[in-house]
Image: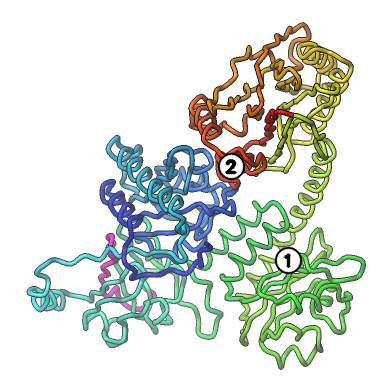
Amino acid sequence: MAVTGEAAGGAEPGPLDAVLTETVCRTEASAGAVWVLDPDEPLLRLAVIRGIPPKFAKPWHTVSLAAPLPASDAVNDQRLVWVNSQEELARQYPRTALATPYQFALAAAPLISGTVCWGALLLLWPPTHPPDLSGREVAAIEDGSRRAAELLDDAYRAGRLIVPDRIQVLDVETAPADGSRHTAAAMRFVERLPGGSCALDLEGRVTFATSAAGELLGRDADELRGTQLWQELPWLHDPVYEDRYRAAVFSRQPASFAACRPPDRWLHFSLYPDATGISVRITPAGTGPGPRSLSRPPQPPGTTSPVKAGQLYELIHLAAALTEVVGVSDLVDLVADQIMPAFGAHGLIMFVAEADRLRVLGHRGYPADVLGRLDGLPVDTVSSPAGRTLTTGTPAYFADVAEIKRHYTAPALASGKQAWAFLPLIVSGRPVGCCVLSYTHPHQFPPDERAVLASLAGLIAQALDRARLYDTKQRLAQGLQKALLPHTLPTVPGLEVAARYLPSTRGMDIGGDFYDLIRLGPASYAAVIGDVQGHNVAAAALMGQVRTAVHAYATAGARPDQVLDRTNRLLADLDPGLFTSCLYAQIDIGAHRVLLANAGHPPPLLRDPDRSTRVVDLPPGMVLGIRPDTAYSVTEVPLPPGALLLLHTDGLVETPGVDLDKATADLARLLASADAEDLDQLTDSLLQHTRPPSRRSDDIALLLLRATST
């Protein structure tokens, strides 16, 4: 279900393509795109794009839901995101503004069907768009988003792939029905105009050029067709010129620049864009020093070619992305998914030094047997280029096998790769690791590329240092969480039990949700579920105190209301600064009844043996730890054989933008209709009812109990 990241044009349009096209037309947007939420990872994958070359969107072929970007915010917050200018983009989304420093407005909307979000829709407009969206535009965006979501929802229910294997590029080329009759006349008209004319598609390729344009540019017009001017003509290699073209594509506004055709002939280029491409007028602008205010002078012969505008902004985007990665696996994925393709690399290994050994921290493009030979090599400057790089802090580049053979032996050649870049990862002046980019064919490393790689290596090192610290804290948090929750639940005659705890997918995998099943007597048990405010170590620590207190008071013989009352007094005395909700259920198995007391927690759901399901009507009660003199009431509910009682935390039903009562009612309907033969499978089914795992913003604890006849 992965997306390759390669653009694919020319495929037959599908329903999703038609929805995007119609929405772009109805809103009079200049471009649009649709991302689909990956069902297995917290990622949005670009599925369809219209009006913008896919290479321009390369940094966003995959979008992490954790990244501060318009599409991810639209999905996470389930709201319409509107950015009316480049200035506003820089304020709200600085990383996006750095990578696309052009004038345009944008809107991003979530694709929601029912309670499930399937992805995001993005639309772009020229900067001349009014500061606010009109009611007509908002209605069209909402309609298009809803229809796209329904298509994805239908595809999911039908068992079809909902993430395409490649990006669909929609063709916006249009031609008049009787265009062929006027072609000759149009050609004669254009040729008669002073100066030269040519047309570019949205990819920047020449689709048409007059003979005068060829003469001015020093190429035959036929030779220019199908090329990009800044690649075909050495004197247009300066990234300033490509940047003006990119600005015209994004903003749909005219642009211009002047360039010097050697030795001293200046030409003026005027660019006029629309949804299908760019018309270019080329006119002489004099000789000699020329209008330098309009352009940068050409580079002297023999100097290094500058980094292209697209590469420059992509590198800025990558640099900004490196500051946002969290764990080591996220860092390896970012380097592999974005930095490797940016430099055409085919393999990646990230080493760190541990006890004078090189340990593989992450990799891509290497088989397991090769990694087995490379992992654990000594930090040896003689036989290992990675060891030398790590020890000296100096990068090393090998363009082919012959070059590396002159310095090193077998370990460096174990992978069968043909070229390598060994980049030191230095933190506070101390090398801590080595990042290796490798190639399946010989690869030259020109000075400009080496400079960029060295700079990125420094940023990777800083990100690695933060990521390793985060992972250490994560392991500590997970260990604490595991220690505080019950390892197993007791086996209870006359009662079947299933439980789950799922952490949120934001921040540390730790929280304050808890559950427990406590033996009170031969035929009496207490089921407890609660939620401490927060998602950090303090919340987990307080959760442990609450769970211990409830357990102690319950086993001492206190009634349900007394258990909550005494726990509340304890927390009020401790004054932890966090509040706690808790639901306490004392189950009398022999009498087939449950006594319930509630301290500000979501009420349980009860499914009777006839499958009728309802939310148990309980007084809500005050959360624990606020007022020490709070009194709690007890509600008795029958629990006959075959009845199901569902205790849960609010993470199971709360979704931003969705009415809580409606979400709870949906959960009750699901519980009523679900097959309850296997409680573990039923628990999994209830959890799937929530937002996709990649989009959980709150912990979930769930305790499911079924009374049996024994």
Q: Is residue 269 magenta?
A: no
Quarter residue 189 falls in = bottom left
Image height of 294 relative to 20, above or below: below
Quarter residue 186 falls in = bottom left
Q: Is residue 278 magenta?
A: yes
Image location (x, y in percent) of residue 528: 75, 25
Residue 652 falls left or right of residue 627: left
Image location (x, y in percent) of residue 342: 56, 70
Q: Residue at x 61, y 81 (%)?
A: 446
The one nearer the camera, 436 or 626, is 626
For residue 280, which numbered disc appears in the image? Answer: none
* Type of amino acid at the residue the image marks with label 2: Ser
* Quarter of the figure with the C terminus: top right
Residue 585 falls left or right of residue 341: right
Q: Main secondary structure of the magenta part?
A: strand
Mark 1, secondary structure of its residue:
strand
Image location (x, y in percent) of residue 697: 61, 38
Q: Dot 2, crowdedness within 10 Å: few (<14), some or many (≥20)?
A: some
Residue topped by disc 2 = 685
* Residue 105 visible (yes or no): no
Residue topped by disc 1 = 362
Q: Residue reaching furthest front?
A: 710
Magenta residues span 274-289
Image location (x, y in percent) of residue 50: 35, 59
